[in-house]
Amino acid sequence: MSWSLEVSIEFEQDYRKLSGRNAGLRRAVDAKIAPLREAPLHYKPLRAPLQGVRRVQMGGSYVLLFEPDVGRSTVRLLRLAHHDEAYGI
């Protein structure tokens, strides 16, 4: 079962900014979207205050934060940022 995908404005801005400078990161994110839509609950859940959010490492130093909604079978992409900055959403 493939989950539907929603993209936040913050993720769009992060993706546009980072992928313009780093083609390898863009390819890594694009390649990770399909498996993420197939099994979003497989990835690491975060603790409070980010309860309900999950993460997946991208290209070494970057993190993709997303929020699965089980009831609607939807994955909402929240942020794409360097590890040092990602958790301040």
Image: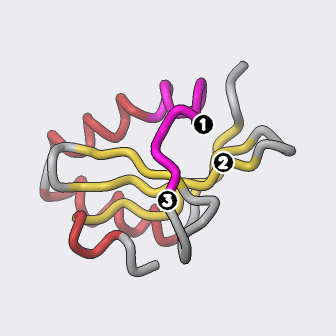
**Which span of residues is magenta-colored?**
33-46
| Residue 8 in picture, x, y percent from top left | 57, 64
Q: Which residue is mark 3?
A: 46
Element type at marker 1?
helix
In percent of the image, x 73 and y 44: which residue is there? 74
Q: Quadrant location of residue 79?
A: bottom left
Q: In front of the other: label 2 or label 3?
A: 3
Mark 1 and mark 2 in contact? Answer it, CB < 8 Å: yes
Q: CA distance from mark 1 to mark 2?
A: 7 Å
Q: Which mark is residue 68?
A: 2
Element type at marker 2?
strand
Give the class, few, some or many, for how many residues have Cα within 10 Å of label 2's Cα (few <14, many ≥20): many
Q: Which mark is residue 41?
A: 1
44 in magenta: yes
Q: In front of the other: label 1 or label 2?
A: 1
| Residue 66 in picture, x, y percent from top left | 53, 54
